[in-house]
Image: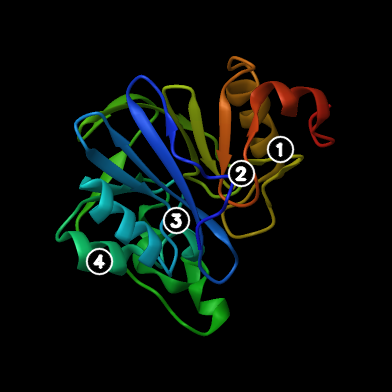
Amino acid sequence: MIETEGEVKETTVISVKKFVTGPIETNTYLIWNEKRKGLVIDPSSGCDSLIRLVGKERVGLEAILLTHAHFDHLLGIPEILAAAGSLPVYVHGADAPALSDPQLNGSQWFGHPFTFTGLIKLIEEGMQRIESFDIRVLLVPGHTSGGCALLLENYCFCGDVLFAGSIGRSDLPGGNGSELLEGIIGKLLILPDDIIVCPGHGGRTTIGREKLHNPFLV
């Protein structure tokens, strides 16, 4: 399903499209640059619309990028690979073991164990060249040990760290509530107010809006 708010947004370098996918309505993002090179962020199951748009826009997918390694952000990996061929999957090293462990990624809880054992590349905090894109990686543990926010131009893809009016859970394996709050306050809320926050679930927001109105942070 394509969410209606996810109009294609043109910036100086990238376009962003949001899709709502999977069993618990995960936000999956497709981004591409002016050279039609693209990344998929957090693919859950049911990526048919995304794959069709890749074909329509003639996007050459280069990689899958994960904000963290919970099952609802992984289930679509096989669909993307089946459509685009062999691609690396980027994830922080602290979360990498969960890709091949259904208990760690949570898929076992739903009775459909999921594992991925393909090509994995690790991201780490700081500026990083990921295929054709320069991305600033912010490690924000607390939802998972290796949860990251990914800054690309004026977009912040933050997975399940920060939501519009809420924050991520910290009661799952690898979670830590104090670390999560510390990371959000110390790394995300210091970003410019006009940064567009693209969370793993729900609608988008801005850093400025969350600083003023998020009840967990004010």
The percent position of residue 163, horizontal first and vertical second, equals: 67, 42
The percent position of residue 65, horizontal first and vertical second, equals: 34, 46
For disc 4, the marked residue is: 117
Q: Earlier in the sequence, mark 1 or mark 2?
A: 2
Q: Earlier in the sequence, mark 3 or mark 1?
A: 3
**Toward the viewer: 188 or 46?**
46
Do residues under tags 1 and 2 come within 8 Å of each other at their CB atoms? yes
Q: Which mark is residue 142?
A: 2
Amino acid type at image mark 4: Thr
**Mark 4: which secondary structure?**
loop
Q: Earlier in the sequence, mark 1 or mark 4?
A: 4
For disc 3, the marked residue is: 69
The percent position of residue 109, horizontal first and vertical second, equals: 57, 77
Between marks 3 and 2 in the image, the one whose residue lies nearer the viewer: 3
The percent position of residue 215, horizontal first and vertical second, equals: 85, 35
Q: Earlier in the sequence, mark 4 or mark 3?
A: 3
Question: Residue reaching furthest front?
Answer: 56
Between marks 1 and 4 in the image, the one whose residue lies nearer the viewer: 4
For disc 1, the marked residue is: 178
> Which quadrant holds residue 23?
bottom right
